[in-house]
Amino acid sequence: MGPATGGSQAGTGTGGRTGGGNTAVGGKSATGGSIAAGGKSATGGSSAAGGKSGTGGSSVAAGGAVTCSGSMPTGGTQHCSTYQEGTSAGLSWQVWSNGSAGCITTYSTPAFMATWNNNGDFIGRIGLQWNDTKTYDQYGTIAAQLSFTKTGTGGGYSYIGIYGWTTNPCVEYYIIDDSFGTFPFNAYGMSQKGTATIDGEVYKLFAGTTTGTGGSRCGSVSSWNQYWSVRQKARQCGTISITEHFNAWKTAGMALGKMDEAQILVEVGGGSGSVNFSTANVTTTQ
């Protein structure tokens, strides 16, 4: 059941933290391995126990300048597991795999390194975790600052960008700025809702519904909304103005609910490689 080359299949994975968590970016449909380039049919997200213990993250001026030539910080703590989560540098992090253990290294500053070696569907991510009580505009301006280098391969699908959920309505969302594979791509199984120019580049906007177990994030719903912004020219450094994407989605009729999370993410569907984020920060102005 392969999607068109470069596409990504809508998410139906088992969710992340207790009560849901992430269906891995790009989505999945039932148990299985990767399918045609850009798509997947693997079980998504993590289902380990644990509450929403992440911190609220930084409350600083969002959208600051990013040093694109920055080097990785020294030291750091490596976490190799099929599932583990914690906090570092005021942010929540998670590593997850549906195969063998992959690794994420966290630092005392907002940065991380993710490595994998044929681990199946692999996720490494870091960012803000909230408590489903506020809408995005109540956090002021939400933005991510990131700078990264990548090596190796990402298997049948790969995504680098922003990932998160909202509740009431239940929405799983993605802002994708780069990939190891074909880029840009159209979100598999989704309908294009328009375009928006954000941070100096055009993004295609996609929306649709998906089904599975990941909706437990929203009280065990069996289907939920899925929104995508896909940048039309890949980049590896800059600010992602997350609030501007949310505003563009609202204009396109893609309503969001109460904020659960906004995190910088790398997901791959196999392969062997790494991503070094010398900067990986998500900020708010409230």
Image (cartoon, grey):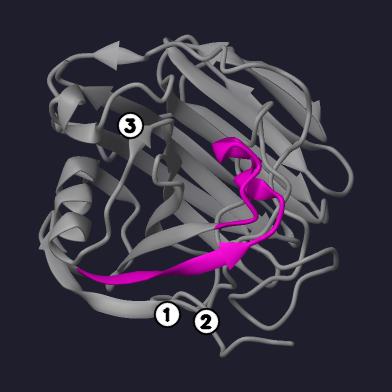
Residue at 59% across, 73% down: 9
User: In this orientation, which residue lies closer to the viewer: 213 or 27?
Assistant: 213
Q: Which residues are magenta?
A: 203-223
Q: Does dot 3 land on a helix, a strand or a loop?
A: loop
* Neighbours of disc 3 within 10 Å: few (<14), some (14-19), many (20+): few
Q: Is 276 displayed left or right of 49 in the figure?
A: left
Residue at the far right: name it: 100
Q: Please tell me whether residue 202 belongs to the stretch shown in magenta.
A: no
Asked if 180 appears above or below 275 in the picture, the reply is below
At label 2, the amino acid type is Gly
Disc 2 from disc 3: Cα separation: 30 Å
Disc 3 from disc 1: Cα separation: 31 Å
Q: Which mark is residue 70?
A: 3
Residue at 43% across, 38% down: 167
**Contact between labelled residues 1 and 2, with CB atoms less than 8 Å apart:** yes
Q: Does dot 2 land on a helix, a strand or a loop?
A: loop
Q: Which residue is mark 1?
A: 186
Disc 2 from disc 1: Cα separation: 7 Å
Q: Where's the C terminus, which quadrant? A: top left
At label 3, the amino acid type is Gly
Q: Which residue is mark 2?
A: 6
The answer to which image quadrant residue 91 occupies is top left
At label 1, the amino acid type is Asn
The answer to which image quadrant residue 144 occupies is top left
Residue 66 appearing in the image: no
Q: Is 109 displayed left or right of 139 in the figure?
A: right
Asked if 280 appears above or below 147 in the picture, the reply is above
